[in-house]
Amino acid sequence: MQQLYDVLIVGGGIVGLSTAMAIQQQYPWAQVAVCEKETRWAAHQTGNNSGVIHAGVYYKPGSLKAQFARKGQRSMVEFCQEQGIAYEVCGKLIVATTPGEIERLENLYQRALANGLEAQRVGPEEIREREPHVRAVSGIYIPSTGIVNYTQVTEAYARIVRDHGGDLHLGTKVSAISERRDVVVVKTNRGTMQTRFLINCAGLHSDRVAKLAGARTGMKIIPFRGEYYELVPTKRHLVKGLIYPVPNPNFPFLGVHFTRMIDSTVHAGPNAVLALKREGYKKTDIDLRDLGDVLGYPAFWKLAGKYMDEGLKEMLRSASKALFVRSMQQIIPEIRAKDVVPTHAGVRAQALMHDGTLMDDFVIISSGRAIHVCNAPSPAATASIEIGKAIIERMPPLERRITSAT
């Protein structure tokens, strides 16, 4: 007889496992399971991001991103302290390198204040004190931003879920979902499972899992690859912490920035280009189904037309190390091409609505006996504990099953 779970979660990234952990905290008696198609946790977005504990500077006041990032920064730091996970609250500089960027910097400063953050205006002298090799005319310092290894955090979540009786299924890919009156039946490559409630945290494949479950989301996931360079060891001294440019309001990405990782390596990027495969970490990675999904989606062409100029710049920078280095030099002029080498890439799962609108916030959709997390890019790792709590609030209350001896 198949085991009947109270909650089955699809997706073993940081959001899926944080949700499992939150359910166990709320319902200690619940039978919880997590299915992950890869053979390890945090294999995709979680394990390939920049490792930043975001404060919530950029997000629209009142949005889920703004709320969850601010709360998530605190809960992530507390979790790392409790679990003995290495982290550092190192602060972040956002710098204007030309006078023409100062107005945008001021707007960002006001947004940070509206989001309830401590933010400090800094001039050229204080910028040089914090980051001696940066050349900028003005900046904002956000002291609550930090760094951590999110793969280690996710593995800690998994350990906690397992220690509290959760069933963790690696190498388990979902192929079909059918909702019946009292249960959801989930078919996988390792057999069929049943659950009273399903939570979809499948990241890059969240729209497809939602479709399997019969949910109408009105969106499709578009994969964007973020390409990074790494400073060679002899040049790591050029960056002491986190250094970001003022974001371009005409483009939905943050631009090339510098991140000192928790292992002391320094990464610069990302460059943001369309990935030709949902898990396409290399430029040569192509999947015809994934590519056909994008090119056959009318909303993509609306998006491409809107961001054609900026998108072309990103593609050129992807093809040319010299152009990539030039972007770095706008902040740290002494960097040279020989000072950086290619390093890992990440793929961001970005939800695009049918009308061509990029979803700018987290999207959590309820449908029957399921909840679908359909848009959870950055700062989802920072906010993972808070997202788990929010999912529980959207779930119908779980009733404890009564069993009797025969």
Image (spheres, rainbow, N blue to C red):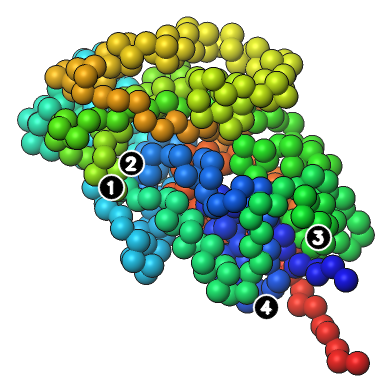
Q: Quick one: label 2 or label 4, which is nearer the N terminus?
A: 4
Residue 263 tag number: 1
Left or right: 55 as drawn, with respect to 173? left
Three-letter amino acid code at disc 3?
Met
Give the residue furthest to the bottom: 406
Q: Gap in Å between the C-alphas at discs 1 and 3?
A: 40 Å
Mark 2 or 4: the one toward you: 4
Q: Which residue is mark 4?
A: 29
**Identity of the residue drawn at 55% across and 52% down:** 40
Q: Is residue 188 visible?
A: yes
Give neighbour class at mark 2: few <14, some 14-19, many 20+ (Cα, 10 Å). Answer: some
* Discs 1, 4 touching: Cβ within 8 Å: no
Vertical position of residue 21 compared to residue 325: above or below: below
Judged from the image, the secondary structure of the residue bearing numbered disc 3 is: strand
Residue 113 tag number: 2
Q: Gap in Å between the C-alphas at discs 1 and 2?
A: 31 Å
Q: Quick one: label 4 or label 3, which is nearer the N terminus?
A: 4
Judged from the image, the secondary structure of the residue bearing numbered disc 2 is: helix
Judged from the image, the secondary structure of the residue bearing numbered disc 1 is: loop
Give neighbour class at mark 1: few <14, some 14-19, many 20+ (Cα, 10 Å). Answer: few
Q: Gap in Å between the C-alphas at discs 4 and 3?
A: 19 Å
Residue 283 tag number: none
Left or right: 111 as drawn, with respect to 219? left
Quadrant where the N terminus is found in the figure: bottom right
Mark 1 or 4: the one toward you: 1
Q: Which residue is mark 3?
A: 193
Q: Quick one: label 1 or label 4, which is nearer the N terminus?
A: 4
Give neighbour class at mark 4: few <14, some 14-19, many 20+ (Cα, 10 Å). Answer: some
Residue 351: percent from the left, percent from the top?
A: 62, 31
The residue closer to the viewer here, 317 or 59, is 317
**Identity of the residue drawn at 79% across and 44% down:** 175
